[in-house]
Amino acid sequence: MTGGGRTRIGPEQMGRGTEPLLTFSAGGASFGLLATAVHATVPRSAIEQNSLSGGMCIGSITHHRQRIPVLRTAALTGLGTPSDTIETEIVLVRTSEEERIGLAVDTINRMIAAEAERMRPVPPAVAGGQGLFKGVISTAGDGEQIFVLDPERLSAHPDIVELSALSRRPRKETKRTTLRSEIRSDVVEERLRHLVFDVGTSVAAPAEQIVRILTPPGAVTPTSATAAPGVEGVFLLEGGPVVYVDLAAHLGLCSRPVDAAAGRVLLVGRGQHRIGFGVHSVDGIETSEWRRDGQNGGGRIVQLGRGAGRVILPAIDLHRLADGLTAPPPVSGA
């Protein structure tokens, strides 16, 4: 996982009856992929040209000691204009438990929610007969067309089956699990996607806890001085109130305010119990290898990635924080 230079992930809604998608652009077309199929996102990087280069395959990158072939998204899908550039942002797709493939993209855009009833079929002629799509959706407001890739069809594509098999790790690396369990009995194996963000320091939170990612609100109604640390006020979202909390200030980590351009708001909760946690930036998605719950008041930590590129970060339970902020005040004299 890396920090600087990663594309910021922007807003949309996730609700009941919807599927969370990571959206990205390539060759002038917009695509979406189920967040559960995304292994990680990689900031703009130079792709190594090697024996794999040719046709739709640009070459490969090494991500956490795993060699992963990278494909031209436009050439694979038949949508957009193929590019010869070898420096792109990359979406890493989980094609099996051990295998990965990379999709070269111009920009990793935002997290959205796809409502099944809004999905429309993609005409076969439009997609070049590849049949890799679940459908196409049009976003509210700007009417952007997002072509939603089907993870199962991607994994079954003959070229992807052949290339992703090359990403398998050497078997000798599996011994690390045994060694770790011998050292610590409180380490729990856990492969869970985490959103990585900055609150004065890099932290992670389970991506499934976040309903929506927003840009900072333009207007916030201030709260009284008796509010919890970091609670700055209330803003309206689609006619309903959201409590805005500067997460770094709430955690006592940093007093630097959230920047209107680079900052993001992580929306947690539903209905009248929505909290918007302001963070300095959202830096990407990574998959955890293990977690360790804190003892004697210590916090949880997770390892993201493996090998030389692994990172151990504090893990924040946004649901627990939101529950603490939305709990009713104690009854006086009770």
Image: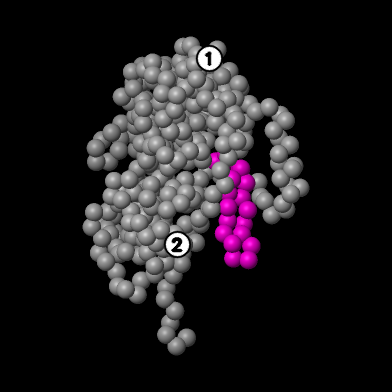
**Label 1 to label 2: alpha-carbon separation:** 47 Å
Image-quadrant location for residue 4: top left
Name which residue lies at 57% across and 47% down.
312
Q: Read off the magenta span.
A: 287-305
Name which residue lies at 49% across and 61% down.
320
Q: Is residue 281 visible?
A: yes
Q: Tell me, yes or no, whether the highlighted magenta stretch contains residue 247.
A: no
The residue that label 1 is drawn on is: 50
Name which residue lies at 62% across and 36% down.
307
Q: Which mark is residue 266?
A: none
Depicted 99 relative to depicted 301: above or below: above
Q: Earlier in the sequence, mark 1 or mark 2?
A: 1
Label 1 CA crowd tier, 10 Å (few <14, some 14–19, many 20+): few
The front one of 158 and 191 is 191
Assign a secondary structure to mark 1.
loop
Q: How is the image coloured?
A: one colour
Q: Amino acid at mark 1?
A: Asn
Q: How many marks?
A: 2
Image-quadrant location for residue 275: bottom left
Q: Residue 310 in the image: x percent, y percent?
A: 58, 40
The front one of 75 and 146 is 75
Image-quadrant location for residue 221: bottom left
94 lies left or right of 230: right
The front one of 148 and 249 is 249
Q: Tell me, yes or no, whether the highlighted magenta stretch contains residue 304.
A: yes
The front one of 211 and 191 is 191
The residue that label 2 is drawn on is: 251
